[in-house]
Image (cartoon, grey):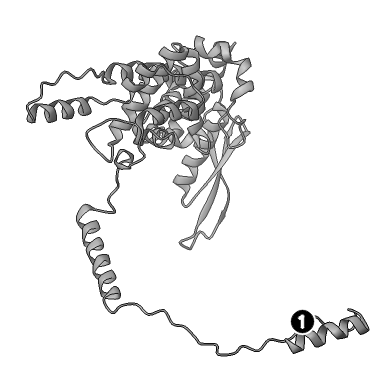
Amino acid sequence: MAALWKTCQQCLRYGFSNVSIYTSITAVNAISKRNFKAHWVAPTLRELKRRKVIEEDRNGGQKIFHRSTFLEWNYDAEIFAFSNRLGEKFNDSSLRAALTHKSYIERETARLSDVGVESNLQFQDNEALAQKGGEIMSKFINGYLRAVFTQVPEELIRAMHDFLTSNSTLETVAKHIGLGDLMLCADFPCKTETYVKSFKAVVAALAESSGEERARVFVQDLVVTQLYGQDVNELWNPVDPVGNLTAILKREGKAEPEFRLIRQSGSSSILAVYYVGVYSDKNFISEGAGESLEVAKEMAAREALKKLFHTEDSMRALPFGRQLKNIQSKIAQLENQPNVQLSEWISKKVMSAVH
């Protein structure tokens, strides 16, 4: 207290500029503290961890609990949030039917029968909706691909369609929009077939609620966009690229392809690479590289087919949104009109089909 009074007197006499108002404070009676735990805590934690590892090994991984087991679970609120999260308007009954699997109804009926309760469940499964949604999805995808890839053979269109409608692709989309927590089914974690069927049923439910046009836009935004980052040429593997190229050039009235070795490197090592060019009527078409002459020849033929089908690495990005206005009318028109088959492909026939 005396030190503080002395400091105040100095401040009044000399001002605040030369005197520090902070004084050093020395710690008195500072006692270090340690956190002690009972001797049984560490062995107990080790035992609990050991039991957890054994349980995970027995179950094939960490056990996953369904969201319905949580205390704050509210299925009605989740259904409402799902519709708003997607920005779509669903009929409540249609959406609930789309998310109800047949196995769930069978399980609930059997459970009520076991306890002696007469089962008269007013549930509708998603079998019919899934079939309808699959048809809507397949038709739109075919029309979109044929309107965008006008110069590719129908075999490549079919390969891209099969990729987009495959179980793995649709399961990925269904998981990303949160269907796993909303589906009513007997199995958990849900099987791939359950995800696929529920997603197709949601497409049909949207068509019934907001019209088929909204369902087509829904498929475009969630399913067709899965082609981004994919090399469409790798989705289709022609059996004989050299033979296909030869047949196309013959139908075009051109000379057979001539393969020439352009350059090579490291031919006497395990890292050999050969560059082969394709020529027709002394005109360069494309080139390819490979670890042997046969592989390089096949790759050169594949590059030539890419050039003919306009599916090179530098092709335009897929159109979406406002860019679809120019081909919107073609999509519906080409849903049931296949592209030219590979065995009949010539540039004149393709151009006539486009125009």
Residue on which the image places disc 1: 22
Location of the N terminus by quadrant is bottom right
Residue 212, horizontal then vertical, whole percent: 46, 13
Near mark 1 (Cα within 10 A), the count class, few <14, some 14-19 or many ≥20, is few
In the displayed orientation, state which residue is furthest to the right: 14
Rendered-image quadrant of the C terminus: top right
- Answer with the quarter of the image where residue 205 lies: top left
**Residue 180: x and y, percent?**
35, 36
Depth check, front residue: 218 or 18: 18
Q: Residue 49 occupies which quadrant of the picture? A: bottom left
Looking at the image, residue 187 sits to the left or right of residue 311; the answer is left
Relative to 40, is 122 above or below? above
On the rendered structure, is 346 left or right of 122? Answer: right
The answer to whether any part of residue 160 appears in the image is no
Q: Residue at x 31, y 38 (%)?
A: 68
Q: Nearer the viewer, residue 336 or 63?
A: 63
Q: Is residue 273 visible?
A: yes
Residue drawn 92% across the image and 84% down it: 13
Number of dots carrying numbers: 1
**303 lies left or right of 92:** right
Name above or below for residue 340 compared with residue 99: above
Q: Quadrant of residue 204?
A: top left
Residue 133: x and y, percent?
A: 37, 18
Residue positioned 37% across, 16% down in the render = 135
Q: Amino acid at mark 1?
A: Tyr
